[in-house]
Image: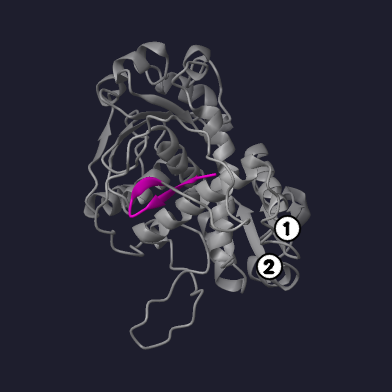
Amino acid sequence: MAAAAISGGHLVLSTPTSTRRPQSLPLHPPSARPIAASPASAARRGVAAAAVSSPAAVPSTGKDAKQLPKDFLHINDFDKDTIMKILNRAIEVKAMIKSGDRSFQPFKGKSMAMIFAKPSMRTRVSFETGFFLLGGHAVYLGPDDIQMGKREETRDVARVLSGCNDIIMARVFAHQDILDLAKYAPVPVINGLTDYNHPCQIMADALTMLEHVGRIENTKVVYVGDGNNIVHSWLLLAAVIPFHFVCACPKGFEPDAKTVEIARSAGSKIEITNDPKEAVKGADVVYTDVWASMGQKEEAEYRKKVFQGFMVDEALMEMAGPKAFLMHCLPAERGVEVTDGAIEAPNSIVFPQAENRMHAQNAIMLHVLGA
């Protein structure tokens, strides 16, 4: 059977030529619009908030040869062609998994260490299940198993785990921790979340947009809520693929100014506003997240007062227009940042979005492992 793929920025169909290719189409609306082609964005733009470049994955073959990151730490460490290639692979492998075909086992004999300084249902299940479905074995290391930076230095953890595993995924608080892991680990490191950014989530969101909106370029994505690590990741995607991104947040809760400038300087239209009702008009996607993230729960009651008027409800979605989809990275505090009615509405794609964490991350792991 044919499989969906992205070629030259367009969503197209191709016929598999090998039994290792997808056997069925991913489930998405038949009315999905094509992705407009445009020149690739400049690769590997800098990242604000003390981020540094990853060590190279491929040795340079000449003094002017471009070195590629061995890790997946920030979306804008990669150029547009690479990001689209990863999303294309996600579509292909998702189709294979959904068809029940288990012949594709690129991670057979490989192991992954998963560091969780912050616990998470979606991150653990999506990485562990995805790695298993493709033949690998994942080792869970919870908050009390390592105590990275306290019981053992990050640089030591990086080298010990690299000696026993082929890849490391880490979900941590401080962004510097993921940078240090990548610096000292000879194996690829994937950023499962930091206080600064959450690139795997936004890759899953981009995949979900391709399936339901039909494109990423020239869309309008409106985020309503706190200018947090999710917003930073959307901005870094906008530094690679041009689209209109709006963050509607209360005063004092704006995203990092340097990250906003990275996206703007790359050519995307970026707006930061305090008026969610005006912001959502004409949106392709309305996106929200909890108002108080893990580590901020002591501020929860204060934030509920400050964020009054920023709840995504049925009325706000109606203002966005009939084409708008609702997205939420979960977990959701229903009745706080989003209503039951909005999250359960026909235009909510929250749960396909959650499933796509696994498929996007499978493609990321395939990319960094060269599989």
Whether residue 318 can be seen here: yes
Image quarter of residue 252:
top left
> Closer to the camera, 35 or 313?
35
Q: Is residue 233 above or below residue 332?
A: below
Q: Which mark is residue 136?
A: 1
Q: Are marks 2 and 1 in contact (CB under 8 Å)?
A: yes
* Residue 4 magenta: yes
Query: Residue 275: x and y, percent?
Result: 27, 23
- 331 lies left or right of 210: right
What's under tag 1, amino acid-wise? Gly
As measured in the structure, the alpha-carbon distance from the residue carrying label 2 to the one carrying label 1 is 10 Å
The residue shown at (32%, 30%) is 251
Between 205 and 73, the residue placed more toward the observer is: 205
Which of the 4 quarters of the picture holds residue 287? top left
What secondary structure is found at the residue carrying circle 1? loop
Q: Total label count?
A: 2
Residue at numbered disc 2: 166
Callout 2: 10 Å neighbours few (<14), some, many (20+)?
some
Above or below residue 342? Residue 19 is below
Query: Whole-percent x and y of residue 315?
Result: 36, 11
Determine the image quadrant of residue 366.
Answer: bottom right
Amino acid type indicated by mark 2: Asp
Residue at the (53%, 14%) spot, across then down = 340
Say which quadrant the N terminus sits in: top right
For marks 2 and 1 on the same chain, the one whose residue lies earlier in the sequence: 1
As rendered, which of 244 and 298 lies closer to the eye? Answer: 244
What are the residue bounds of the magenta stretch? 1-12
Q: Please identify the dominant SS of the magenta region.
A: strand
